Image (cartoon, grey):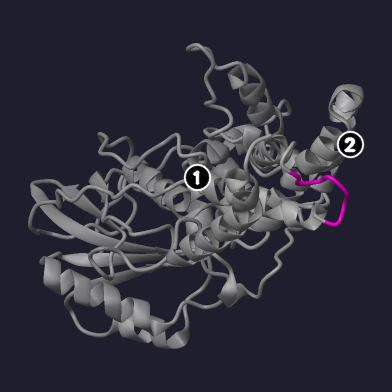
Amino acid sequence: MSAPASPAPGRGPEARQEARDPALRRRLRERLLSLGYPAFEETVRELLLRMGYTDVRGAGRRFRRGRTLRGGMDLSATAETGVTRARLLLQAKQYERPVPRRFVDELSGACRRQGAWGGVLVATSRFSRAARLAASQGPSPRIRLLDGDELLSLLISYRIGLREDPAGRLALDTSYFDGLDGGARPLAVRAPAGALPLPAPPAGPGASSEQPEPTEMQWRTHLVLGIASLWLLTPLPGATDGRNAGLMAAAASLGALLPDLDAGRSRIRSLSFLGVRPLEPVAGALNRALGHRGALHSLAGLGTVATASLPLLPSTGWLPLLALWLGFASHLFGDALTPAGVRILFPSERRVHLLPRRLRVPTGSPWEDLLFALFAALSLALLLPFLLSPRP
């Protein structure tokens, strides 16, 4: 599986030193692990394109993490060297623990089914001994293992997700990853740009024409969770009576969407009045300054919103403000159930998770659909009595 490779951009002594920077590598790895799966897949795709692979496409996923529509593959790509052209399949794994052998077997099986020359298994962690042994056995299909250390080195070498700070040192480009996590960069085909340092095969069939399946955004789950959180206010007199149930639900809904004002794309950012999006400039400035799931997804963000809304107290009273704050807090609670977690003590980099690793809820998965149904039922149970009660 070896082939001549041209030097990548910036692969001199200075680039090698940057690639060994432990602090930079740690921050980059943490950011990769915190990405939603489509954003991580797009990062791998961008790397392949810069390395010279062509026709890099998503295989199509039912949701952000889990089985693909064509099991065992996440991406397909075409490698060209001289007059030869071959198709490769890829799996990408956001893992902190060692990647087991079964993924090597899955990818090998997908290569056989799809008639691909070989495959590449990309991971943010290392591979188990059994996985390395399985990848080295047999001449076909050929499986290349790209572990977390090598992935980080390649991302740094090709300046993916990185920028130069004022002192000329490489730093994490948060706007790049936030744009991916906000869904601003869909998987698509692009022309090659760069060299081909990964092994290229001698021959193979053409590339796949499969298109990626879109994934749902999670704003709807946050919305019903915000409304359902109003159950916590029912002991307060007048909190959800017929006179203000609609106002309380609206305030909780607004609070539940507010933390995503810092996202590259979000439901609250796209709210339009008479064709005008009043929150677009504010959202863009917050995204550039803070990044997604940064300050707004923290106790500091909740405190800022609470303080900023206090001038409304004379006109709204306490109850709508409490609903707004509770809705905001429910968003943080919901994100703490996902694999990405939340930096609740921002600016600390530590991410808080409320569930064990195996029970965390991937965005857009059937588990999130189940949570959506549960919170929607709780919201309906709260509001239905007031919707059905006779009006005075």
- Work out whether mark 2 precedes mark 1 in sequence or the reverse, and give the earlier one: 1
Which label number is shown at residue 318?
A: 2
Q: Neighbour class for label 2 at 10 Å: few (<14), some, many (≥20)?
A: few
Q: Nearer the viewer, residue 288 or 341?
A: 341
Q: Amino acid at mark 2?
A: Trp
> Where in the figure is residue 233, as x and y percent of width and height?
81, 52
What secondary structure characterizes most of the magenta part?
Answer: loop
Whether residue 1 is visible to the viewer of this picture, yes or no, is no
Q: Is residue 321 magenta?
A: no
Q: Nearer the viewer, residue 118 or 31?
A: 31
Which label number is shown at residue 132?
A: none
Q: How many marks?
A: 2
> In what element is the residue under mark 1?
helix
In the picture of the structure, the residue carrying the numbered disc 1 is: 157
Query: Residue 203 is drawn in which quadrant?
Result: bottom left
Q: Residue at x 65, y 40 (%)?
A: 253
